[in-house]
Amino acid sequence: MLCKVQKIIDRSDTNAPAPTPLSVNFREYDGGAAIAQAALASEIALAITYNGLSQAVMMVSPGNLEDFIRGFSVSNDIVQDQSEIYDIHLTHFDQAVQADVQICSRAFWALKDHRRQMTGTSGCGLCGVEALEQALPQLQILDPVRLPAAEHLIGIRDRIEQAQQMARSSGALHAALYFDTQGEALICREDIGRHNALDKLIGALQHVGINSRRGFTVVTSRCSLELIHKAVRARLGTLVSLSAPTALTVQWAIKHRLNLIHVPHRNAPRIYSPA
């Protein structure tokens, strides 16, 4: 795909926030309505290779891409921590970005071995087992940490809205935020994808060396099992969701000692883990 689009810039040191939302013309469903403009969220295709090996192509919001790649690499168990990422080189096209990531030999050989196992079992009736192992992986059990103070969750939705700068102008964006031990929002990452937003936040936290075992992380999206996987792999201490978790999500949070809190629209926050 990338060879069919125009290359516009090549650089390796960009981690800029997302550009200003695009203004798009529209007209209300009325024959006499005038043409107006709306600011809409941007998205691009991002292709990621590790040591020259193609791994994934996904649609993302075009901002904080290095944060996303770092978080994606950790939360998808490609590297164990940021020290195993040696370099990230981004090549920009008009509607796409190619990310060439250099990782350590241990991580690369583990990635190649996993891909080889997937290829070897795809024709022998075991591919379903491989898929289940990915959906229900073996994860480390975290050391328990204190729950955040109850007052830090008061008015959390209003504070999140203030931190979501891109969503205020365009909408259609999920967010993941880190709040410190004083209840202050330090980092906010936004993306069209809920997984992407959390990956961007994880990458930002690890890149600047913030201890995410303290404070708490908030996701504005549905709290699915995949988000629990990412939180545990990134060794977050507390995950707060604005949408109710599933029963399986709660079970996994309890099992892996990840604090899990749901903040409903009109009711008091609910602690699901620890039980």
Image (cartoon, grey):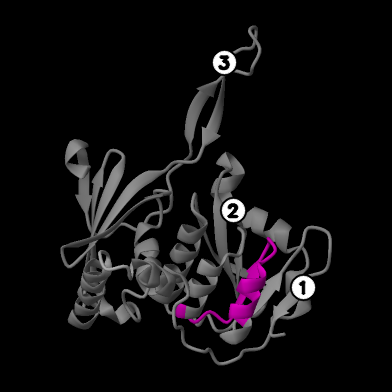
Q: Which residues are magenta?
A: 233-253
The residue that appears at 76% across and 62% down in the rendered structure is: 264
Residue 5: % across, % down: 22, 37
User: From the viewer's perspective, is the residue at label 1 or at label 2 nearer?
Assistant: 1
Q: Is residue 113 magenta?
A: no
Q: Residues within 10 Å of mark 3 (few under 14, many from 20)?
A: few
Q: Residue 270, labelled with which disc?
A: 1
Q: Nearer the viewer, residue 274 or 63?
A: 274
- Is residue 40 left or right of 168 when viewed as pictured? left
Q: Classify the position of the C terminus by image quarter.
A: bottom right
User: Which residue is drawn at the image coordinates 34% and 62% (left, top)?
Assistant: 66
- Which residue carries the number 3 mark? 35
Q: Nearer the viewer, residue 187 or 32?
A: 32
Instruction: Find residue 265 and report its horizontal and vertical position in percent.
Output: 78, 58
Q: Earlier in the sequence, mark 1 or mark 3?
A: 3
Task: Please tell me whether mark 1 or mark 3 is closer to you in this view.
Answer: 1
Q: Position of residue 273 (x, y in %)?
A: 68, 81
Q: Is residue 215 visible?
A: no
Most extreme residue toward the top is 32
Name the residue: 27% across, 68% down: 124
Mark 2–mark 3 Cα distance, whole angstroms, equals: 28 Å
Pick the front one: 171 or 152: 171
- Amino acid type, mark 1: Arg
Q: Is residue 178 visible?
A: yes
Q: Secondary structure at mark 2?
A: loop
Q: Secondary structure at mark 3?
A: loop
* Mark earlier in primary sequence (2, 3): 3
Q: Does the stretch in magenta take in 243?
A: yes
Residue at which label 2 appears: 164
Disc 2 marks which amino acid? Gln
| Quadrant, the N terminus | top left
Q: CB under 8 Å between callouts 1 and 2?
A: no
